[in-house]
Amino acid sequence: MKHLLSTSELSREDAIHLLDLSDQMAEVNTREVKKLPTLRGKTVVNLFYEDSTRTKTSFELAAKRLSADLINFSAKGSSVSKGESLKDTALTLAAGGADAFVIRHSASGAAHTLANSGWINVAVVNAGDGTHEHPTQGLLDAMTMRRRIHGLGATAQRDLSGVSVLIVGDILHSRVARSNIHLLKLLGAKVTLVGPSTLMPHTELFEVDVNLDFDDALAANPDVVMMLRIQTERMSGNFFPSEREYVRNWGLTAERFARLKPKTLIMHPGPMIRGLEICSEAADSPQSTIVEQVANGISVRMAVLYSLISGERSLDV
Amino acid sequence: MTSRTVLNSDDIGRAITRIAHEILESNHGTDDLIILGIPTRGVVLAERIAEIIRRNGSAMPADFLGRIDITMHRDDLARQPVRAVSPTNIPAGGIDDKVVVLVDDVLFTGRTVRAALDALNTIGRPRAVRLAVLVDRGHRQLPIRADFVGKNLPTAKDERVSVLLSDIDGSESVVIEQ
C-alpha cells in the first residue's frame, strides 16, 4: 500500500489487516507510556484546507505516538490566501523532507491529484476530500463495530458478516457515508441508506438498500444506526422545508431511540448537532459509541501511518 | 543447500524442561514471576515453559504468561518492506516490580532482545529482566547475553538456524542450513 485515498480501493485482506493492526495500536494506547519509536526520523505533514477538530488532532496524536515529526498546515493564515496553488504548497512543504501528507480539502479528488500527479514522491492519506471519501473514518467506524459486536480480544481476522447498518441523514454530501458504504459492504455488512430523497445521491452505483422512511427502517431492528450531520456548509438551496420537519422525519429523537433494541449501537462521526439529527438521550447512552469512535480514530491512524511509511521507501513515483 | 538436524523433538522437550527448572531455581520459586514470549516461536516456547512451571510451582498466579511484540521497536524497519505486527498481551497485574523472563527461540545478533527491552520500557518498570532462549548461536552485535540457554550452538555467520515447533510448523526440530 503506497497511499490511502479511498476505501473502495481496499481489498478485503487489506481492510482486515488494517483493522487488526488498529486493535494492536489500541493496546499501545492503553499503556502507561503511549509512545513508540517506530517512525522516528519520519515527517508527517497535516495539510488541512478545511476546518477540522477530530481528524486533525487525531492524525497529530497518531503521528506523535509513533515518534514522527509533524507539520501542521492550515490553509487559513497561510500563503494560500495570497493565491498559492495546491501544487506549490505541496512542493514547498515536501521540500523539507516529508514522508507522508495527510490532506483534507473541499474538492473531491484533491487527495488523488496530490498522490498521482507526480509532483511529490510521498505517501498520501486522504483525510476527507469534498463529498467523495474519508477512508480513515470508515476504518474507525468498522473498528468500533468489530470491537463492540465481537467483543475486545475476539476481533482478530473477523469481518462484519450479517451486521445490519442504517446510515441516516445527509448522504448526498457525506464522504463518511461513501467510505462506510464501500468498506462495510466489503466486510459483509448489510447497509441501508435512510434520509430525505433530496439528500440521497444516485444510489444505483452503491448497490445498497434505500429506505426513505426512517420508522420503517428502524422496525427491522438494525444492529447499528449511524447518524450523519446535515452539511449546511455544502448546501446551496433548500433540501428540506424546515429543521422541525427534518427532526420529525429523520432525527433520532428520544421517542425513536426508546424503540431500539438495547444492543443497537448508536454511531455518529461528529461533529453532532444535538436536537437536530440526534437527541441527547441517544448520544449519551451506553449504546452510543461516539466517544469510542474518536479514541479508535487515533489507533486507526497509527495503523495507517505505520503501514504506509514504516518500511523502506519505494523508488517508484 | 545442506541441512543437518541438531536437536530433535526429545532434545527440545528436555531443553525446555531444564530452562523451566532453572527459572524456578534462580527466582527462588514463582513469586513475582512473569513469562513473556517474543512472537512467533518465542510465544509457543513461553507457553510450554509456563506449563511446566505451573505443574511444579506452588501457588502460581493464574495470570503470569504473556507475549510482547517487538516489531515497532526494531532498528531496521526502514530497511525492509513493512512488517506485520502481532498482538501484545501483558498479564493484568502489569510488570512493575516483577521479574520478567523474556523467551525467544534463537539468540543471534541480540537486536531482537534490545527491541524487546525497549518495548518493556513503555509498559512498566520490572525489578529485573531475564532472557531465556532455546538456542544461542553466537555472533552477537550488541552486549547482550542469555540467562537460560537450551543449547549453545556454534555456527558460521552465513548459516541459517531454523527452530521448528509442532504448534506452528507441524514438526519439531532445530535445523542448521547452509
Image (tube, rainbow, N blue to C red):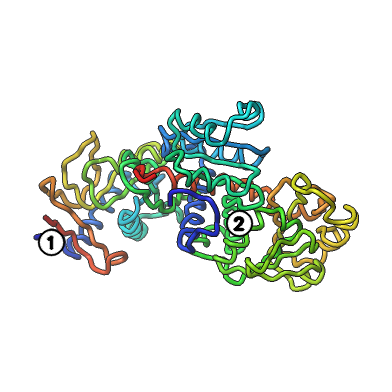
Residue A287 visible somewhere in the drawing: no
Name the residue type under label 1: Thr
Q: Which one is closest to the eye, mark 2 or mark 1?
A: 2
Residue that numbered label 1 is attached to = B5
In the rendered structure, the residue with mark 1 lies on which chain? B
Direction from residue A288 to residue B144 in the image, left or right: left
**In the depicted structure, whether residue A32 falls above or below residue B178:** above
Direction from residue A7 to residue A244 in the image, left or right: right
Mark 1 neighbour density, 10 Å: few (under 14) some (14–19) many (20 or more) = few
Mark 2 neighbour density, 10 Å: few (under 14) some (14–19) many (20 or more) = many
Name the residue type under label 2: Ser
The front one of B141 and B84 is B84
- Can you give x and y, in whole percent of width and height, for residue B77 in the image? 34, 42
Residue A255 visible somewhere in the drawing: yes
Residue drawn at point x = 59 percent, y = 41 percent: A58
Q: How much space separates mark 2 and mark 1, taking CA atoms?
A: 52 Å
**In the depicted structure, whether residue A223 falls above or below residue A83:** below
Query: Which quadrant of the figure has residue A256?
Result: bottom right
**In the depicted structure, whether residue A205 falls above or below residue A270:** below
- Can you give x and y, in whole percent of width and height, for residue A245 in the image? 90, 58
Residue drawn at point x = 24 percent, y = 42 percent: B146
Direction from residue B149 to residue A162 in the image, left or right: right
Residue drawn at point x = 64 percent, y = 50 percent: A293
Same-chain status of marks 2 and 1 = no
Query: Which quadrant of the figure has residue A278?
Result: bottom right
Dot label at residue A179:
2
- Can you give x and y, in whole percent of width and height, for residue B101 in the image? 34, 46
Secondary structure beneath dot 2 equals: helix
- Can you give x and y, in whole percent of width and height, for residue A197 in the image? 79, 64
**In the depicted structure, whether residue A6 falls above or below residue A76:** below
Dot label at residue A286:
none
